[in-house]
């Protein structure tokens, strides 16, 4: 083993991945984009040196991001995806029979281009006539018009000075809310969500959504290739929709609405996503940080300032 | 950052921990034992270069190991711990008011000695008169006599040629079964249990226990400092006891039986432990490998022969 | 910095090179061949994960390998190079005005092909009509016929089981000797030659050549990208030619015979190559290991079995 | 191998040393001081995470630092060492029969204390009644008074903001000059001196000394555990003394003046120290940077701003 990719998860914690092959490697207008084959995780997309998605378990991330939101909606016809240039989020959305239009807006044409070439599992999605692919700013395109049953934000972590900084704020979420059709559902990836780092992005995003939406749920799931639990937050325009589905409801809706077999999600996995540990629920309950462009409050992530002393106090 | 400890999780996947301080480092009769302070995980115990337990989240592992078994029992009075020299497993056991005697048998006196010195959070447990600490072979001591309400195996992974190889086999489990009092419960740590590696130890141990006990449940939980989900298997002498407790039952039993506040476990966390993903349940259902000293079938772990191609097929 | 190439220099000593770009990467019939751009060393050739040659200082290695031998000869017209597929050795040979024919025999056509494409500094040499490039076994081609004024072996280290194992033995050197014209000179790269590892290959090769040739000199030079001093041995068919040239002679011969400016070698550098430290000379004087296919004595190198305890005793 | 010490030699070039044992590790008033046992280099002293000296080849560094200066002097009786807290420089000085007094001034009492305990090879030197050990600032003590036959600066590299920054400037060297007895010699370690990095400290220090002293020589030597060639500069109060000794003179003076056997240096090694490569001599000849506190010109070293593009141009 002589070639490695190294990622610093946090100060004093590094992971190294044996590198089999670099399929493409570019400095795009926005970021460094690498498509590589890793010994341990298979074909993988890396942006700015951080793993975004790996063949070996990308389905866990993408099924967790997409299906809870779409299954919660009685009949999702129009879906907006911010980011997701890799194509896997669109692939999961388009498995839903009810979906008539899926607009996917990613700012980086290079990501889309490389993933189209390198990820055969997403070829069908990219070719689906219901998909409308736009290379542009996810915020700008959404502001211009249109309304949706489900909106999904599949963005980079809010790194200080990074491109997605403003897309995790109450101002942005208020705009999102205005673009949802009645009964609409919003879901966003929300960063690391394990025992020691879920307070960095996941819980502030949760509190921020609660400042805007009448019903919000945080959920998380271990993802091996991310080396931690990952977090999402789902928000409902209609407070009454915030109740969890039963395991049976989930299994029925998957059977009747989704084309093909899911690999990760079913009723029991769904229940597991929403079972938060005592410590996680304490952090959510205590969280007061509302992210705001106006107030200048932002979340920070990835190698930016966590030490053990700052880990969430779990009584 | 100039000092690091490096662990190979599997071929092509290495993790490096910034090393603040080595508190003790010895080649004991059985293994290399290091107590260290890590930048990212705080005070940590390493055996043969592999992390066993870290200050920052050892409670997740130990609460998950101990409490589901003791809470499932109507009134656990006698508990046997194989391994657990660090003291944290005993600490959690002794929080149960009903426990009158806890026998802990670890083969390595050095582990016990160093942890006694370095881990103040376990001092009270080590001093508890209900604890009977024996430095000896966990199998030999159990065979000699005594019977227990709950037996807990907190052993190293079954590494090829390692000391714990035989303590994950149907022959050993049959002996365990014979030492349980009526209504008795057995639980064992069962190695990595994330999406790509749960078939190495966790599911064979599950199948092996099912060959011996009338009711068995596998469960898992993400543990950040282990860089994966971790797995356990719990087995019941009495098939009727295999049903999960409700979240309410768990919360009630914790309140009435356990001294102090748990940090990780409550009813909802408990429910989450037992919600297995679709892929995990498929693996358990399909598992045919029964580990046996007689048949020469063993589980293997940790850098021993997993590649992506061998990862469990998840349909 | 997220991509790295890692090389184990010896057990417990690893070097990692920041990797900018992989230009080509192939498993050839014989070995893994990578042409890469490294942050610290520029464009570099790696074979089986070990650095062979780097833009930043390959001239030190190649000038040291080629010119002492050619300058020692009164008028070198025919030169044989075993290995050297990268082209830099031929480039230095062809700078000598007197050279009429240079036969270069490398077993790996992929190495030659990739280097031709990636190393513009060797383009002129590859296009020189005096160069006869043969893709074949360096030993077999030499045995078939022809005789030379200077023979140069620019081979891989004699790794156990590697392809070049037999090309550092007294049997091979006896054959070489028979292919030298009167007054002929032979030189071979001879592995690491710093204070702690020069006894592994460099001094056994020296002793082996002394068993075959009437005059032999070992020399060494620090090469930064090899992270050590490197060693060569030069042997003379005619004992009288074994005397060192004076610094003035070297400067004069360079001026009159060599096209262009050398970057590393001149009279004083030449003198430095042959000034061995006290410890090095002690090792050479005490060396009794003669490498032989017949006797089954071989040199070993690179991560194969050196520990501090085995380092040469320097009184 | 699970514990490592990692050193960044320059951006994109890291070395990792297998760590056997930490003997002591302290944050002194001035720096981080570690005495460790390394797999590859034996017992080693590290300051601020950078290797200072290793059992396996410290003698190469210390013999090269001390003996050329003392052998150049007709009869050195008084010697001043700035730095050198480890004791090895003093050890080499005190082997000279002529030396009557050796004043060693190191600012960090912890370095001295730990090395006294951990390095038995220097015990005799520390106990020698001719040694006067002062824990204080090397500049301040020298300014206060006294004059010497030989002055040796064995300091840290001039890191920006580091403690030794000002001890490589013409102002400091002018002071040194005023403290030398007639016929006095000054020598200073001068940082990395291999093909790509000798222009950072070694050649500016050379030019700076030339601005102060009538005769100056730079010299260098590969040191394996430093992973490069290392450089020194020697300066003479009396221009006539700047001529090199012949190899015979060196061997004679070593025999008559020095107690015990040297391991590295003799006449031929000495000659090798002063044979600079063509590239090195070109850099020295072209160097115009004179370091000065007053002018604010300083040298920088170690991971501070070298890239390939800045490497010295070697024609």
Image (spheres, coloured by chain):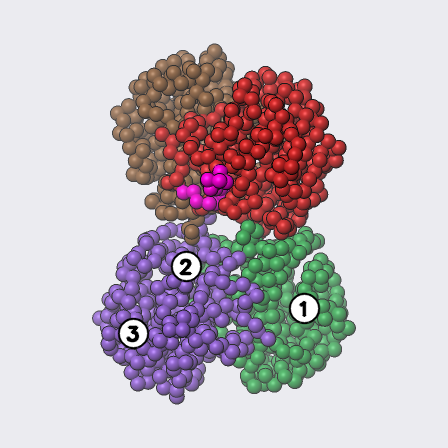
Chain colours: A purple, B green, C brown, D red
Q: Horizontal placement of C274 versus B157: left or right?
A: left
Q: Which mark is residue A50?
A: 2
How would you rate the neighbour count of disc 2 (Cα within 10 Å): few for under 14, some for 14-19, many for 20 or more? Answer: many
Magenta stretch, overall SS: loop
Instruction: Using the rendered image of the protein, determine whether residue B276 is visible from the camera's viewpoint.
Output: yes
* Residue at left offset 32%, top offset 29%: C134
| The residue positioned farthest toward the bottom in the image shown | A240
- Work out which residue is located at the far top of the displayed protein and give it: C240
Q: Choose top left, top right, bottom left or bottom right for residue B119.
A: bottom right
In the image, which residues are magenta?
Answer: D292-307
Tag 3's secondary structure?
strand
Q: Chain of mark 2?
A: A
The quadrant of the image that shows the C terminus of chain A is: bottom right
Q: CA distance from mark 3 to mark 2?
A: 25 Å
Whether residue B76 sits left or right of residue A90 in the image: it is: right
**Residue at x-position 62% and y-position 55%:** B21
Query: Is there CB contact under 8 Å for labels 1 and 3?
Result: no
Q: Is residue A199 above or below residue D122?
A: below
Say whether residue D304 is magenta.
Answer: yes
* Residue situated in front as seen by the camera: B191 or B98: B98
Q: Label 1, on which residue?
A: B121
| Residue B277 x, y percent position in the rendering | 46, 73
At 59% from the left and 45% from the top, the residue drawn is: D47
- What numbered label is drawn on residue B310? none
**Upstream in sequence: badge 3 or badge 2:** 2
Frontmost residue, C220 versus B1: B1
Q: Secondary structure at mark 2?
A: strand
**Please, is residue D77 above or below residue D154 in the view?**
above
The answer to whether dots 3 and 2 both sit on one chain is yes
Q: Mark 3 sits on what residue?
A: A80
Q: Quadrant of residue D166?
A: top right
């Amino acid at each position: 083993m002589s070639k490695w990719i190294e990622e610093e998860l946090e100060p004093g914690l590094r992971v190294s991945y044996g590198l089999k092959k670099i399929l493409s490697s570019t400095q795009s207008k926005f970021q460094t984009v690498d498509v590589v084959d890793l010994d341990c995780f298979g074909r993988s997309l890396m942006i700015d040196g951080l793993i975004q998605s790996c063949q070996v378990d990308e389905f866990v991330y993408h099924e967790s991001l997409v299906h809870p939101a779409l299954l919660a909606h009685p009949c999702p016809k129009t879906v907006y995806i911010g980011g997701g240039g890799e194509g896997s989020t669109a692939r999961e959305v388009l498995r839903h029979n009810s979906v008539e239009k899926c607009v996917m807006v990613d700012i980086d044409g290079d990501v889309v281009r490389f993933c189209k070439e390198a990820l055969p599992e997403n070829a069908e999605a990219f070719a689906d006539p219901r998909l409308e692919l736009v290379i542009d700013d996810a915020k700008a395109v959404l502001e211009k018009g249109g309304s949706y049953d489900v909106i999904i934000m599949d963005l980079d972590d809010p790194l200080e000075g990074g491109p997605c900084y403003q897309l995790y704020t109450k101002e942005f979420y208020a705009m999102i809310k205005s673009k949802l059709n009645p009964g609409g559902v919003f879901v966003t990836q929300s960063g690391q969500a394990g025992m020691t780092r879920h307070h960095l992005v996941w819980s502030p995003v949760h509190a921020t959504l609660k400042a805007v939406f009448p019903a919000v749920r945080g959920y998380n799931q271990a993802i091996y290739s991310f080396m931690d639990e990952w977090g999402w937050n789902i928000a409902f325009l209609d407070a009454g929709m915030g109740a969890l589905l039963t395991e049976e409801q989930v299994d029925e809706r998957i059977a009747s609405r989704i084309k093909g077999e899911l690999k990760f999600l079913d009723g029991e996995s769904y229940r597991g996503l929403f079972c938060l540990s005592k410590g996680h629920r304490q952090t959510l309950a205590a969280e007061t940080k509302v992210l705001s462009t106006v107030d200048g409050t932002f979340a920070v992530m990835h190698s930016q300032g966590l030490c053990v002393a700052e880990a969430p106090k779990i009584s």
